[in-house]
Image: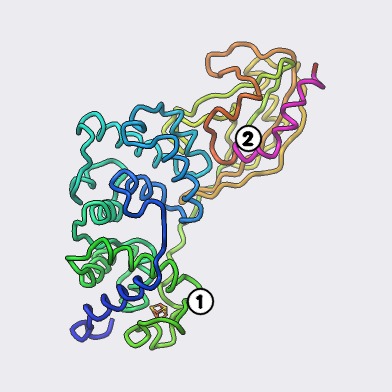
Amino acid sequence: MNSLTKVDYPGITRKILDWHASHPRLLPWKGQGPYATLLSEIILQQTRVEQGLPYYDRFIRLFPTIEALAKASEDDVLHAWQGLGYYSRARNLHLMAKIIANDLNGEFPSTYDGWLRMKGIGPYTAAAIASFAFDEPCAVLDGNVYRVLSRLFTPEADFYTNQGRRDYQKLADQLLPRDQSATFNQAIMDFGALQCVPKLPDCNCCPLTGVCQAYQQHRTDQFPPAKPKLSKRTRYFHYLVPVDREGYTWIEQRRQKDIWQRLYQFPLKECTHSGDSTVLQKDFLKEHQLLDWISNEESKDYKHILSHQVIQTRFHVLTGDRLPEQPAFRRVKIKNLPKFAFPKVVHCYLMDYSIYLNTIHHKNG
Ligand code: SF4
């Protein structure tokens, strides 16, 4: 960064506030109190606003208060979250609702430290809720703010290290006007989301060109520096979808400490490579006494990319007489599958193949 002592922080803050006053961004949770703020912040972790909006609407409609969310079953909460991914957010949100409604008599924590003690709340979310809902002077540092700070000041700090994160937090703190914390936090986040966007920032209409280091150096495309790439593990999931002549199939709830905890799925065979589906099916049929079942449609591959792993998924339909009762699996009607919360890949498969699955047992019969 260039000489820190010469930076006019209050001047930059004023320009961002002025920009915000003339670029209002209407969002349904703004100014709606702590419950709406909490909901929106949890939904928007690792999710774009456009993608999160329908989920926010759904949650407010299904669970209009923190007490209603606390009373809901976990299955209902996960079902409402279906398709958004990172389901630990939904479980943590539900847990927070129970703590606030039952242990804290409906009183929301009002401080940064109070929110940070909640499971699933990190420094950014604690600062955002404390600031937006309770006007505590905490500077938020999310991806949008990081991008703006990186371009304005071109610091050498590596944001993806603890020290780098602290350096960026200091910059954010320097800009924060303590008497307008919520307004400024919203302003700089919106500025990053609408003006100083990742690709092709709108520098021609930007009020900060005179102080923006990246702009001055003609290096806006180099800031923020690219995030170091993590090597990802690939896992191969083969789901067996047995459909009996009465139109039932098997599902189970994922219990193990792994991704998609407590969501439902079909019987799963996991491999470290794409595998031979014929061998897989034989193993499965033998294990579950379904040796006379017939192999049917095999789906295309569905890919799901998570932060540390890639899940390659394929579905194999089997048809046969009547599924036996098995303690590990729940026997459910194909037409009732939409009532359960599934991982996104299973949900996408069901969207693509629901007509096929709903009719195959007639042919089978
Ligand atoms: S001049 Fe361009 S890069 Fe710099 S803050 Fe404005 S929009 Fe962002």
Disc 2 residue lies near ligand 1 with CB under 8 A: no
Q: How is the image coloured?
A: rainbow
Nearest the camera: 121 or 132? 132
Residue at 49% in and 45% down: 84
As measured in the structure, the alpha-carbon distance from the residue carrying label 1 to the one carrying label 2 is 41 Å
Residue farthest to the right, as pictured: 363
Q: Image quadrant for the C terminus? A: top right
Contact, CB < 8 Å: mark 1 with mark 2? Answer: no
Which residue is under mark 1? 200
Please give the label number shown on residue 130.
Answer: none
Disc number lying in front (1 or 2):
1
Q: Which residue is mark 2?
A: 238
SS under mark 1: loop
- The crowd level at tag 2 (other Cα within 10 Å; few <14, some 14-19, many 20+) is many
Q: Amino acid at mark 1?
A: Leu
Question: Where 324 sits versus 26, above or below?
Answer: above
Quadrant location of residue 67? top left
| Rendered location of residue 56, percent (x, y) | 44, 45
Could you tell me residue 227's position as x and y percent? Answer: 43, 65
Percent x, y of residue 110: 19, 47
Residue stretch rendered in magenta on the structure: 347-364
Residue type at numbered disc 2 = His
Residue 54 is inside the magenta segment: no
Nearest to N terminus: mark 1 or mark 2: 1
